[in-house]
Image (cartoon, rainbow, N blue to C red):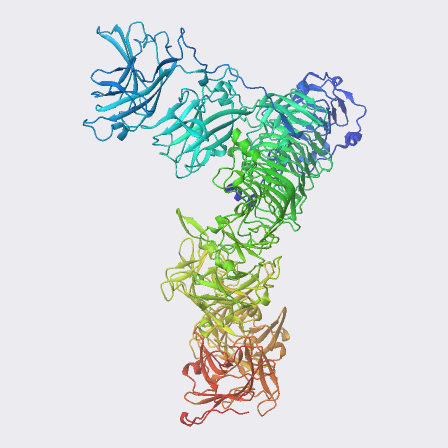
């Protein structure tokens, strides 16, 4: 997917800024982007003209308009232009033209009208049906001039629209405001563009006037200058002085004689011939090339002092050379003979040869006038070079004039641009080829015989680099631009490894490699492959045609040593340029000679279009016509090549033109602009107009055609126009609906072209338009940061409820069609949607049919970046997307979209369904890779190609993950794939490719395929490839794609199944052999498999890094461990990539486990770590959607094991409670980040937020939901906290009494966020509830110190049912970090011996206490006979008070309870005061001096009831500062059903005058009847016939049953989900005695729910046979709970009978002093019912030695 500018990243935030609107019409009107204060209406004074009736029109010539001033055609007046219409009339309105009435032009009128402005408030009528040709073109031309902004003064009827003044419309405006256009300047039957049907090729052969010709021998000489085979002698050769030479019979390479020179003492010695002495002066022509050829050999002479080999053999130096040495007779300046010598073909420095081996020696010799001057002394040509002691031997010497075979045939000069490309000319010679080589390399002509036929070829030997090669000059005069040639050669490389060979063409200004997209000329050559015929197409351009030379050479880029052989090199024309185009004959009636037309690009590049001039159009009489142009072009694609590939021919001229005057050199990109503005319900007609050079770059609303804020103008026809050379956009529809925008052309424009601007535009018809050469707006011309014109799109749509059909996007610098939808309407259209009712990203879909997009630099079509999410699937129908540099179609960040029909090919990627697009269907589509047509075109024309490239072409690219985890996947159905794989000529292409990108390593892009077809013989890897994904280090290998009909089966058997990753995870549960290798695709095909995924979400703590989900097939016993996965994000800080703690540890983030399994009747799933069962605090479970296959796994096939939580796990629900690990592991945040604070309360570390910006943000973590599964259990929250300013690091204070969350002094609190899944399938609803405050800051707050958070909560049904509970500390002011330490959430038992907790306030804080009304509370010193008391410090209402919630578990319905305590009263200044206990509030209006009352507030749902329960009943004892006296208050209430069943019950003081304050201490609540020390269990025998006083633990059901043990009733405990489920009761420890023995006893039966007896083993300590027992649990504030067993089953177990649980104990000091003490009976196996009776706890008067054991009874 292509990237998108960061500038557009803020687009959503800028949607209400002035968007693509009309900033120039904003002065004195309103917000930027608005032209008018209100709409313009048709002028009533125009009467019938507003209905199209133009009567009683007057002649222009009779009006005597002064064109030197502003000309206004008055409202109600119709004027006919009657000046000559032959093109000679020119009118220049110096002051502008304002048409308030009507102006009509005669049909086909020609002339030029120039004006500063043209305003149409009335009617403008233009009609033109003439053929677009010759001087008809631009016959009627409107020219806008001037550099000054023009004010628009509306007619008085519309004065209010400009607020009684003018609307500024900028410079060069053509504005329709309240008026109507009647412009029909091109017949409806005239096409504006047509597809190219075919071309007519010019077969005229190429010719050349300048080419090399064969030389003729001079003066009767022959071509053979010297021909000596040394069979009868060696004349005319001689031997150098000082050496010896003679014939060597039989010594030659072929057994004949040779000429040998030996005993050489100098390097220049060797065989030589004096050409001058031979009298060759008249035969040798200066400047002419002569070919020298010989066989030669050098050898070390016996007895010489040389080494074993010559230096040439060893080093490549001092090799054999041919030297021509000439001397003249004339003296130089010193009187000595003047000498000159030259060396030709010297092998030293270029050619290396071996000793004792005959080799071919060739040279090309060119003589000049000096060599054969009249005064020359000699012209010696000799062999030399090797060092002394090396003999030189030669044979078969020839020096010849090149023959005609080495030159072009004069009758066929241009048939082949290469001469001697096959090395077959005699004598064999490389001429006219040149050699480019390194020291020691050489080229020779060699011969070999194959199948009886001898063949010559060029052999390059001794290479020491990539460049040694032969080169030749092409016959450049034959080259004609746009001609296509076939360049071919046979090449052989002697390399064991495969090598590529490149063919290079070089002109004086350019060097290029022949091959599309940089592809090699020959691919994969090796010694094993031998000769390979290579061929490429190449298109010559103007650069080649005008070049003085074109050189052809070869290069092996990755091989520096191997020998190379080359043969049969040719460059032959395969296609001539053309200038005849066959199209529909519909153009013949209205396109004509002289018209400018566009041939759109047929390549990847928008630049490869052609703008041409029509020379003639001929109707062929067969529904076609042939257009001949003045300029030839290269052959483009036509329907003859395939209907999907045809280019378009578009008419760029019109007979009516609107253009600016070129008078603004300061602003070259400011042209004129045309606007139809604020004119609703008026149908406009603008057809057949050419708007050239329009638009003003960088100014809002200055566009070539702007339909601005018109509302509904249904019936308007904006068609058959052409916008060329636009400076800013093209056809812009803004705040306008119901327009027909059809058959328009746009070419060479900046910014978005066909555009819906604000996102409100709906029900517009946009059909059969064509845009090309849509250029990106330069940075300094961008309208604003909210605009995206720097990524220009030919069609830019901001609202989907519009209708697009048959449009062509034929070359944009970025995108063809771009659907970019925001969530809001933008710009001035916001006023049309004040309630923000329109959300473009979810609006209904109009349609998108039969559109085509090609030759775009980016995507052909994209939905990006904000996406589209319609309720009903939006289907893009029958699109054609070809030859785009990006994807043909990109769907990004969207949902519920479809692609149906159409064809995509020759794109980098045909269809990309991005990772953020889901629930996408692709059906009935043709998908092509690299077409043979484009391979030839790209290769021949040297055009850009996707092959080769850094990544292979793909058909449909899918991603491994979706936008959201609950998203739907992909459906691919009935798709025909073609031209993929090796057969396409593009290595590595594949039809369906999995993108290599991963999010978290898991595959969740659930997909299904069926009806896929491929080319015959296509390999598996050509069909499907996931190797990039499989190779990603983070991919866990769990891909599963459902193939419903076996389309991808490796054996094409048609057997359905799943394509899966080649991993053990995916095959473990399949039968052996059921999964077939999909060779080359890194995947398997599992036949008849039906996989389904089950997702488990857990917290992200690193504690779970090594946790796996172990899955066991209960049928086969096979198991697999599925790893967890988590998308860990990073960020860059100070140029270093670091963990992004904000993103990674937000409370929404999860680690996931997703077992993907085929069907089996029984799977067991559990979390394990290092082989042991494990529980990750909480789990949210959900199935993937049901697959289309059957059978599949569901809830009935799985057993998910949840290990029972033990006491240690539930002793503190907070892990890493203060960062004691030195990390924040287990901690997350609700916003505001998370970090370690390097200073703790009880250690070195604490947990801190990291940059809070909202009050709701703070640190938190998930709690173990197993521990919170029992309704009614109680937990205590204790924590230390500090507040630190994020910016300064300074500690902040807070006020525990402050309840206004928006107040900066607010203190933190603990809250719970509870999620319960409403189903267990992906996409099911989730219920989220919050509970707060679970704990609050405890007063008093101590500045500069650690302070306390404290709270106690009871597990509610919501908590027990939650799948996850996130505890977080929040509510401090933004900008302050919350730092916490020693966070404790532990079980507690709030005893009922005193249900008012912290009633004596001796903890020194206010935990358990809160306020009602506007009041604050504080700790006061001293208290009543103690250190502390509690007081109010500000009471604003008479009911304002401290308050306390009653523990409802302590209440038994029908029982009486008493609340008492001590109280003092203070006035608003803090002085102690008295009250009169005999007064009653409100009686006789008494509201002062009345003593406070104690009330109870009962809340159930949304019903609140306040009850009076107590007051000061004794006479008030006088109190003062000097003589402190505490008075007593008391109350009694009965726990009726309303109280017992309430959600909450709170006590508080009321009916005391506001502003006065209250102080209390030693508050307690107890049952009226105290417990009997002899029997501390209430209702332990159930004989009351109810379950009063007995509490349940877990999700059990408790009831009474008959009979009991020797009695009427007993208790039955059923529905036990866990062993720990049972019953409990509070023990009143105030009546217990230290050191006294107590007995615990109960009778017990165990039954299955069916009533069948269940047996346990009293000796078992673990497992299912463990028997129940009795335990004691203590709980003190801020301390962990402590549990100890005290009674067990005694004796042998009596099956089906009553058994005894019995134990003896003394109570510990901690138990005696604890605030909460309870007994528990539990421990039977889960699912087993416990029947209990005679539960006793009583004091004994015996010693331990007197104790006996229990016995079983029946």
In this rendering, would 1293 be left or right of 1414? left
Residue at figure coordinates x 51%, y 39% from the top left: 986
In this rendering, would 666 be left or right of 457? right
Residue at figure coordinates x 42%, y 76% from the top left: 1427
The image position of residue 281, as x and y in percent, is: 34, 8
The quadrant in which the C terminus is found is bottom right
Front residue of 635/410: it is 410
The image position of residue 1701, as x and y in percent, is: 50, 87
> Residue 813 lies in what quarter of the image?
top right
Relative to 1460, residue 203 above or below: above
Relative to 907, residue 1717 above or below: below
Tag count:
0
The image position of residue 662, as x and y in percent, is: 58, 22
Residue at figure coordinates x 50%, y 58% from the top left: 1149
> Residue 1732 lies in what quarter of the image?
bottom right
Residue at figure coordinates x 21%, y 30% from the top left: 307
In this rendering, would 456 be left or right of 1656? left
Front residue of 1479/1197: it is 1197
Front residue of 581/1542: it is 581
In this rendering, would 1321 be left or right of 459? right
The image position of residue 219, as x and y in percent, is: 40, 6
């Amino acid at each position: 997917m292509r990237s998108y500018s960061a500038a557009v990243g803020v687009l959503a935030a800028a949607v209400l800024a002035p968007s693509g609107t009309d900033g120039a019409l904003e002065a004195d009107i309103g917000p930027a982007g608005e032209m008018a204060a209100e709409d313009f209406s048709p002028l009533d004074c125009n009467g019938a003209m507003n209905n199209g009736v133009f009567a009683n029109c007057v002649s222009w010539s009779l009006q005597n308009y002064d064109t030197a001033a502003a000309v206004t055609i008055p409202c109600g007046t119709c004027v006919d232009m009657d000046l000559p219409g032959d093109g000679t009339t020119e009118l220049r309105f110096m002051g502008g033209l304002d048409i308030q009435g009507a102006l009509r032009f005669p049909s086909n009128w020609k002339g030029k009208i120039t004006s500063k402005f043209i305003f149409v408030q009335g009617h403008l009528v233009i009609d033109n049906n003439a053929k677009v040709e010759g001087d008809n073109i631009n016959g009627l031309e409107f020219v806008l001039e001037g550099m000054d902004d023009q004010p628009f003064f509306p007619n008085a009827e519309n004065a209010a629209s400009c607020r009684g003044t003018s609307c500024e419309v900028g410079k060069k405006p053509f504005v329709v405001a309240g008026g109507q256009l009647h412009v029909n300047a091109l017949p409806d039957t005239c096409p504006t563009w047509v597809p190219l049907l075919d071309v007519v090729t010019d077969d005229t052969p190429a010719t050349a006037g300048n080419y090399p010709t064969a030389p003729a021998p001079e003066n009767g000489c022959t071509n053979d200058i010297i021909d000596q085979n040394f069979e009868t002698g060696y004349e005319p050769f001689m031997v150098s002085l000082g050496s010896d030479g003679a014939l060597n019979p039989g010594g030659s390479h072929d057994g004949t004689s040779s000429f040998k020179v030996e005993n050489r003492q100098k390097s220049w010695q060797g065989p030589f011939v004096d050409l001058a002495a031979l009298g060759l002066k008249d035969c040798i022509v200066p400047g002419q090339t002569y070919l020298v050829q010989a066989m030669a050999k050098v050898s070390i002479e016996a007895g010489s002092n040389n080494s074993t080999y010559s230096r040439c053999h060893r080093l490549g130096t001092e090799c054999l050379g041919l030297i021509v040495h000439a001397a003249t007779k004339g003296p130089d300046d010193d009187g000595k003979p003047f000498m000159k010598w030259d060396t030709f073909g010297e092998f030293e420095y270029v050619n290396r040869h071996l000793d004792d081996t005959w080799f071919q020696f060739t040279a090309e010799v060119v003589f000049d006038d000096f060599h054969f001057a009249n005064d020359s002394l000699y012209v010696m040509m000799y062999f030399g070079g090797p060092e002394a002691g090396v003999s030189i031997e030669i044979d078969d010497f020839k020096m010849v004039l090149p023959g005609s075979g080495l030159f072009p045939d004069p009758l066929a000069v241009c048939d082949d641009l290469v001469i001697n490309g096959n090395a077959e000319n005699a004598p064999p010679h490389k001429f006219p080829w040149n050699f480019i080589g390194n020291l020691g390399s050489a080229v020779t002509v060699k011969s070999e015989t194959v199948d009886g036929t001898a063949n010559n070829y060029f052999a390059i030997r001794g290479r020491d680099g990539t460049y040694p090669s032969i080169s030749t000059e092409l016959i450049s005069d034959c080259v004609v631009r746009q001609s296509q040639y076939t360049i071919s050669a046979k090449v052989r490389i002697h390399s064991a490894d495969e090598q590529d060979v490149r063919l290079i063409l070089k002109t004086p200004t350019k060097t290029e490699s022949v091959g599309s997209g940089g592809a090699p000329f020959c691919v994969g050559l090796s010694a094993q492959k031998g000769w390979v015929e290579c061929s490429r197409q190449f298109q010559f351009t103007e650069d080649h045609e005008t070049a003085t030379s074109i050189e052809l050479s070869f290069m092996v880029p990755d091989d520096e040593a191997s020998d190379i052989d080359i043969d049969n090199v040719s460059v032959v024309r395969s296609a001539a340029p053309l200038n005849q185009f066959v199209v529909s004959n519909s153009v013949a009636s209205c396109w004509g000679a002289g018209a400018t037309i566009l041939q759109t690009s047929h390549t990847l590049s928008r630049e490869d279009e052609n703008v041409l001039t029509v020379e003639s159009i001929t109707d062929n009489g067969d529904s076609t016509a042939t257009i001949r142009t003045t300029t030839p072009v290269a052959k483009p694609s036509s329907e003859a090549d395939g209907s999907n590939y045809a280019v378009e021919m578009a008419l760029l001229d019109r007979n009516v033109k609107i253009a600016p005057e070129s008078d603004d050199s300061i602003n070259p990109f400011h042209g004129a602009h045309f606007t139809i503005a604020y004119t609703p319900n008026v149908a406009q007609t603008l057809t057949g107009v050419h708007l050239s050079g329009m638009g003003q770059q960088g100014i809002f609303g200055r566009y070539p055609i702007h339909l601005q804020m018109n509302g509904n103008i249904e019936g308007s026809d904006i068609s058959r126009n052409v916008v060329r050379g636009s400076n800013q956009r093209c056809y812009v529809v803004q705040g306008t609906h119901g327009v027909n925008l059809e058959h328009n052309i746009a070419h060479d424009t900046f910014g978005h072209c066909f555009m819906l601007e604000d996102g409100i535009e709906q029900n517009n018809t946009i059909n059969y338009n064509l845009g090309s050469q849509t250029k990106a707006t330069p940075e300094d011309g961008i309208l604003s940061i909210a605009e995206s014109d720097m990524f220009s799109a030919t069609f830019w749509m901001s609202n989907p409820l519009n209708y697009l059909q048959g449009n062509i996007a034929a070359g944009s610098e970025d995108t063809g069609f771009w659907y970019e939808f925001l969530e809001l309407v933008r710009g001035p259209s916001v006023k049309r949607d004040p309630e923000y009712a329109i959300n473009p990203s979810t609006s209904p879909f109009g349609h998108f049919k039969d559109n085509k997009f090609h030759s775009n630099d980016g995507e052909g079509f994209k939905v990006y970046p904000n996406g589209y999410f319609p309720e009903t699937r939006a289907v893009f129908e029958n699109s054609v997307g070809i030859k785009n540099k990006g994807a043909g179609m990109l769907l990004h960040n969207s949902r519920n979209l479809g692609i149906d029909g159409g064809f995509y090919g020759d794109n980098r990627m045909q269809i990309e369904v991005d990772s953020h697009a889901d629930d996408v269907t692709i059906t009935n589509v043709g998908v092509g890779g690299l077409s043979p047509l484009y391979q030839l075109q790209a290769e021949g024309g040297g055009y850009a190609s996707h092959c080769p490239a850094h990544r292979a072409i793909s058909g449909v690219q899918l991603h491994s993950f979706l936008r959201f985890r609950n998203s739907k996947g992909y459906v691919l159905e009935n798709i025909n794939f073609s031209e993929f794989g090796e057969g396409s000529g593009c290595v590595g292409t594949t039809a369906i490719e999995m993108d290599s990108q991963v999010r978290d390593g898991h595959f969740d892009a659930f997909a299904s395929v069926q009806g896929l077809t491929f080319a015959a013989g296509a390999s598996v890897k050509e069909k499907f490839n996931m190797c990039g994904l499989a190779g990603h280090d983070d991919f866990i290998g769990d891909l599963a794609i459902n193939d419903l009909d076996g389309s991808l089966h490796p054996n094409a058997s048609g057997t359905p199944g799943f394509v899966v990753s080649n991993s053990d995870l995916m095959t473990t549960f399949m039968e052996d052999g059921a999964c077939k290798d999909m060779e080359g695709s890194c995947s398997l095909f599992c036949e008849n498999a039906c996989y389904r995924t089950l997702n488990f979400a857990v917290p992200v703590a690193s504690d779970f890094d090594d946790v796996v989900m172990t899955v066991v097939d209960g049928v086969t016993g096979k198991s697999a461990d599925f790893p967890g996965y988590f998308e860990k994000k990073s960020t860059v800080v100070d140029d270093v990539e670091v963990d992004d703690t904000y993103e990674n540890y937000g409370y929404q983030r999860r680690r996931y486990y997703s077992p993907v399994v085929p069907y089996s009747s029984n799977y067991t799933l559990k979390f394990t770590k290092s082989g042991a069962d494990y529980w990750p605090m909480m789990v949210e479970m959900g199935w993937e959607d049901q697959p289309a296959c059957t059978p599949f796994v569901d809830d009935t096939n799985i057993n998910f094991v949840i290990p029972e939580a033990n006491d240690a796990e539930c002793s503190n629900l907070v892990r890493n409670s203060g960062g004691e690990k030195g990390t924040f592991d287990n901690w997350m945040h609700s916003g505001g980040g998370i970090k370690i604070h390097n200073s703790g309360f009880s250690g070195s570390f604490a947990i801190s937020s990291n940059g809070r910006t909202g009050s709701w943000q703070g640190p938190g973590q998930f709690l173990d939901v197993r521990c919170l599964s029992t309704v009614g259990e109680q937990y205590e929250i204790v924590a230390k906290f500090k507040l630190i300013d994020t910016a300064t690091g300074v500690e902040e204070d807070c006020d525990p009494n402050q309840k206004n969350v928006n107040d900066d002094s607010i203190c933190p609190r603990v809250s719970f966020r509870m999620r319960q899944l409403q189903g267990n399938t992906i996409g099911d609803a989730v219920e989220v509830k919050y509970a707060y405050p679970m704990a609050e800051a405890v007063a008093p707050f101590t500045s500069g110190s650690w302070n306390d958070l404290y709270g106690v909560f009871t597990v509610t049904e919501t908590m027990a049912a939650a799948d996850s509970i996130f505890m977080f500390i929040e509510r401090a002011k933004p900008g302050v970090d919350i730092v916490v330490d020693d966070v404790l959430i532990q079980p507690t038992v709030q005893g009922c011996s005193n249900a008012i907790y912290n009633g004596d306030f001796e903890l020194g804080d206010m935990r358990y206490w809160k306020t009602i009304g506007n009041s604050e509370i504080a700790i006061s010193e001293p208290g009543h006979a103690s250190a502390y008391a509690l007081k109010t410090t500000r009471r604003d209402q008479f009911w304002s008070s401290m308050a306390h919630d009653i523990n409802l578990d302590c209440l038994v319905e029908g029982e009486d309870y008493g609340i008492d305590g001590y109280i003092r009263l203070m006035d608003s200044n803090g002085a102690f005061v008295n009250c009169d206990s005999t007064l009653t509030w409100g009686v006789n209006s008494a509201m002062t001096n009345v003593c406070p009352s104690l009330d109870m507030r009962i809340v159930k749902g949304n019903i609140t009831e306040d009850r009076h329960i107590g007051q000061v009943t004794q006479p008030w004892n006088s109190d003062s500062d000097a003589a402190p006296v505490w008075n007593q208050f008391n109350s009694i209430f009965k726990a009726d059903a309303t109280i017992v069943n309430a959600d909450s019950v709170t006590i508080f003081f009321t009916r005391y005058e506001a502003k006065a304050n209250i102080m209390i201490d030693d508050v307690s609540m107890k049952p009226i009847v105290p417990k009997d020390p002899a029997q501390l269990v209430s209702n332990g025998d159930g004989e009351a016939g109810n379950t009063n006083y007995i509490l349940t633990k877990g999700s059990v059901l408790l009831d009474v049953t008959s009979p009991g043990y020797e009695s009427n009733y007993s208790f039955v405990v059923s529905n036990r989900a866990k062993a720990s489920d049972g019953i409990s009761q509070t023990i009143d420890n105030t009546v217990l005695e230290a050191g006294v023995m107590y007995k615990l006893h109960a009778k017990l039966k165990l039954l299955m729910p069916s009533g069948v007896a269940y047996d346990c083993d009293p000796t078992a300590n673990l497992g299912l046979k463990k028997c129940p027992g009795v335990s004691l649990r203590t709980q003190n504030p801020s301390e962990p709970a402590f549990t100890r067993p005290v009674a067990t089953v005694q004796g042998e177990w009596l099956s089906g009978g009553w058994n005894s649980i019995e134990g003896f104990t003394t109570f510990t000091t901690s138990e005696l002093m604890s605030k909460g003490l309870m007994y528990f009976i539990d421990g039977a196996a889960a699912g087993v019912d416990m029947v209990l009776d005679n539960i006793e706890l009583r004091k004994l008067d015996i010693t331990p030695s007197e104790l006996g054991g229990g016995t079983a009874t029946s």
